[in-house]
Amino acid sequence: MKVLLIDDCLDTGNLVKQGLFPIEVTHSLSIAEAHTVLKSTKFDLILIDVTLPDGDGFTFCRELSKNPLLASTPLILLTAKDELADKVFGFNCGASDYITKPFHIPELQARVNAHLRITKRIDDLSLKSKYFELDLNLQKCFIFKKDGSRKDINLTPTEFRILMSLYKAQGKTLSRDEIIRSVWKNHGTSIEQKGLDTHVAHLRSKLGKLGTKIISIYGVGYLFEDENTPPHTR
């Protein structure tokens, strides 16, 4: 588990790191530092101080809450502001919880662990990449758009299962037989290999530019490119 703390106080950072151990805590001293870290690391929970040297935590919390990649990431505000109006405002900015300073470590531990348990249950029902989310409960694929919104690309159940199988094995070539076994035979049906190729062609078309991440391996099967490889034009 990884937690990001955004607070300009080194003492608070040390206290939180010690209190939440063995959870890995990354401490950013400013919003700018947090932006940099968030570009390269996925966190399970984010703690945000309200008073920061380069902006206020309320505004930053609102910004993060609108990021589709952080849709299931709890955002907890840490602040000395203990007025009811401040708390209500914080929740309206997208905060999952609000902890006032000075706080007791056992309470911080309990709140963080409670949110992480909820997050794990949610994550068990979805697969997320930089570019899309697969909702295992709804069996839908949502592509993340540049404006931060999500678009349902209306995959058929078969197309969804193909994409899920390929994405779970990203960076590894799956033979046509492996895909057919996963997508059809495990559901009591079967299909010829040419039929699989037709479904993959339709899937690529619906994915648009992201469809280029599904690579045909001649004579073998298909490969979903590693997450860190951006989609491109072939």
Image (cartoon, helix red, strand yellow):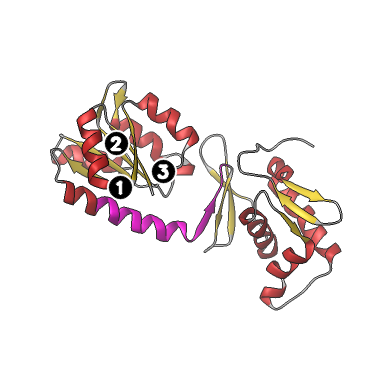
Q: Amino acid at mark 3?
A: Phe
Q: Mark 2 sits on what residue?
A: 48
Find numbered disc 2 in the image and state the secondary structure of the residue it sits on.
strand
Crowding near the residue tagged with mark 3, few <14, some 14–19, many ≥20 C-alpha atoms within 10 Å: some
- Percent x, y of residue 31: 35, 27
* Vertical relation: 15 (above or below) 176: above
* Vertical relation: 217 (above or below) 232: below
Find numbered disc 1 in the image and state the secondary structure of the residue it sits on.
loop
Q: Mark 1 sits on what residue?
A: 96
Q: Amino acid at mark 1?
A: Ser
Residue 165 or 136: which is nearer the viewer? 165
Q: In the displayed orientation, state which residue is furthest to the bottom.
A: 188
Residues at marks 1 and 2 touching, judged by CB atoms closer than 8 Å: no
Q: Mark 3 sits on what residue?
A: 43
Over which residues does the magenta segment extend? 111-130
Residue that appears at 49% across and 33% down? 39
- Percent x, y of residue 86: 19, 37
Residue that appears at 65% across and 60% down? 165
Q: Quadrant of the C terminus?
A: top right
Corner quadrant of residue 16: top left
Cα distance between the residues tagged 2 and 3: 13 Å
Residue 140 or 9: which is nearer the viewer? 9
Cα distance between the residues tagged 1 and 2: 11 Å
- Label whose residue precedes the other's in the sequence (3 or 1): 3
